[in-house]
Amino acid sequence: MQMFLDESGDHGLSHIDPNFPLFLLCGCLFSDDALVAFEEKMNALKRKYWNTTDVILYSREIRKCEGPFQILFDLLLKEQFYNDLNVLIADADFTVIAAAIDKEKHIKRYGKLAHDPYDVSLSFMMERFVFCLDEIDNASSAQLIFEKRGYKEDTQITSHFNAIRDAGTYFVDGERMRSRVTGCHFHAKMENIVGLQCADLCAYPLARSIVLKGEPSKAADIVSEKVYTKNGKQYGFKIFP
């Protein structure tokens, strides 16, 4: 199994956009078979609209109709594409685990002691990742797949990942964490990794649903249905503080 991670929003605390004061880290957990099936369907969608599988589905470019998504200036085509994209995500077999940090509240509560929202989100996610794997199979384990963000950023993420994996969290000790989480890997966006594209497509709707409370969003509803749930509660979606 593999969990692919991507983010929405800026994790920095030095400047906070009042229109989007949120950082969200989103993970999509796939079994090997489910990932193969998802890749086939995503490639079919790409061939339908671009006659190639080389196009990378990137949420920001889709929303802004940039690059290969300039075809979406055709409003009828845009509607059809979004419908197909929603069906692709809705029908796929994966589980969402996500953590969001309200940066304004984070700073107000912790001040200069406030930790990097990326690190905080990753801690929450790895903890809930273990809970989810516990539900799937007592012997299940998986690796985390990140998108490359730069040498400095990737080194920082790897360092925090290893610290969590070694020491565990308040609810998951290190031994249990290491038995479930086998390691982490990084891939560039241009490598066209479908799991990372799925995480990117899921992250923004979830973040938007928090920032724009109550505003209807079919995409957010679809992603919300994928969140790891236990006893009717979404254990796989943490909003902090």
Image: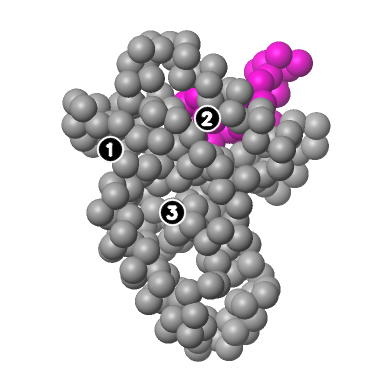
Q: Which residue is mark 2?
A: 122
Which of the numbered marks, if any, corresponds to residue 150? none
In the image, 6 versus 184, the foreground residue is 184
The part of the image, by quadrant, that contains residue 152 is: top right
Asked if the residues shown at circle 1 and circle 3 are in contact, with their CB atoms under 8 angstroms apart, the answer is no
Dot 3: within a 10 Å radius of its alpha carbon, few (fewer than 14), some, or many (20 or more) residues?
many
Q: Position of residue 222 (x, y in %)?
A: 36, 57
Q: Residue at x 37, y 49 (%)?
A: 224
Specify which label sits upstream in the sequence, 1 or 3. 3
Any part of residue 26 in sight: no
In the image, 94 versus 193, the foreground residue is 193
Q: In the displayed structure, would residue 80 be above or below residue 82?
A: below
In the image, 88 versus 52, the foreground residue is 52
Q: Give yes or no for residue 63 being in the magenta stretch.
A: no
Q: Which residue is mark 1?
A: 229
Which of the numbered marks, if any, corresponds to residue 195? 3
CA–CA distance in space, label 2 to label 3? 18 Å
Q: Position of residue 227 (x, y in %)?
A: 34, 43
